[in-house]
Image: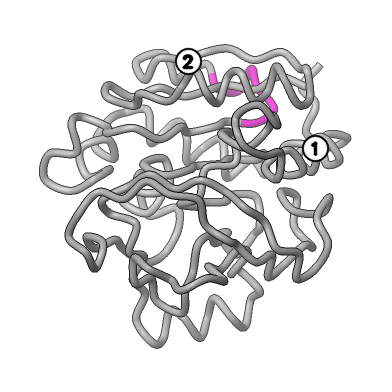
Amino acid sequence: MKFAVLVFPGLTCDLDMYHAIEETVKQDVEYVWHTEADRLDQFDAVLLPTGTSYGNYLRPGALAKSSPACKHLQTFAESGKLVLGVGNGFHILVEAGMLPGGFLRNQSLKFRSARETVRVENNNTAFTNDYTQGQMLTLPVANEFGNYYADEQTVKKLKNNNQIVFTYADGNIDGSTEAIAGITNERGNVLGMMPLPERAVEAIIGGTDGTALFQSIMNNRGEQHVN
């Protein structure tokens, strides 16, 4: 299975994502610079790391969505292959219209780095089937715009379609609607989440609760493998 780490200018945590693939599932992984996204069809899954795309000027992810890379990313997702966006990668997926909702600044109006307790709300996805339903995870967060917002109609749709995959289980400090920490698209092959699983794949960095997410992607590899 071949993974692409799609890198926009300012996404500073591409190395973390690359290392997570090497460490957890030990598969081929390449950095793909945003100007080279026309070759995404060579990969089985695309990973969007966090950071500050284009410096997060305007809104996080708002400038990245105007890159031709997002059109290639949308084509990739429409093929049914898996796309994971974490942190600023989640912002980009929302701004590009690949996931519903929007983002506000944290209720504290400050950047916040911490470890959060996150509940698995749906383990019947290609990203979570190696977890158990209701499992509690400890995952890092690091953001200023971690306050996910969705209106009442969107929340109803997310619930009806089982698109809410993760919620914050310990206070929802940043103020996300319905304590949402991660959602998929309706098809279930695009996941965005604010917690950072790639920073929780080794005990030496504080935990391994992110490992099962990458193992879940591998469990789904049968239909995704390009070679």
Where is residue 74 shown, x and y percent of the image? 47, 41
Where is residue 205 shown, x and y percent of the image? 60, 29
Q: Residue at x 11, y 45 (%)?
A: 58
**17 displayed left or right of 172:** right
Where is residue 3 shown, x and y percent of the image? 65, 22
Question: Which colouring convention does the figure follow?
Answer: one colour
Q: Which residue bears the numbered disc 1?
A: 215
Q: Find the distance from the CA under tag 2 to the CA under tag 1.
A: 22 Å
**Vertical arrangement, residue 223 with respect to residue 101, above or below:** above
Instruction: For marks 2 and 1, give the one nearer the viewer.
Output: 1
Bin the neighbour count of mark 2 within 10 Å (Cα to Cα): few under 14, some 14-19, many 20 and up: some
**83 displayed left or right of 34:** right
Q: Nearer the viewer, residue 195 or 186?
A: 195
Counting the numbered discs, the total is 2
Q: Quadrant of residue 30?
A: top right
Q: Which residue bears the numbered disc 2?
A: 32
- Residues in magenta? 40-45
Which amino acid, by three-letter code, is at mark 1? Gln
Q: Nearer the viewer, residue 80 or 138?
A: 138
Q: Earlier in the sequence, mark 2 or mark 1?
A: 2
Where is residue 12 shown, x and y percent of the image? 35, 23
Q: Residue at x 55, y 32 (%)?
A: 47
The quarter in which the C terminus is drawn is top right
**Vertical arrangement, residue 151 with respect to residue 214, above or below:** below
Q: Residue at x 54, y 76 (%)?
A: 158
Bin the neighbour count of mark 1 within 10 Å (Cα to Cα): few under 14, some 14-19, many 20 and up: many
The secondary structure type at the circle numbered 2 is strand
Q: Residue at x 58, y 40 (%)?
A: 83
> Seen from this angle, which residue lies furthest left?
58
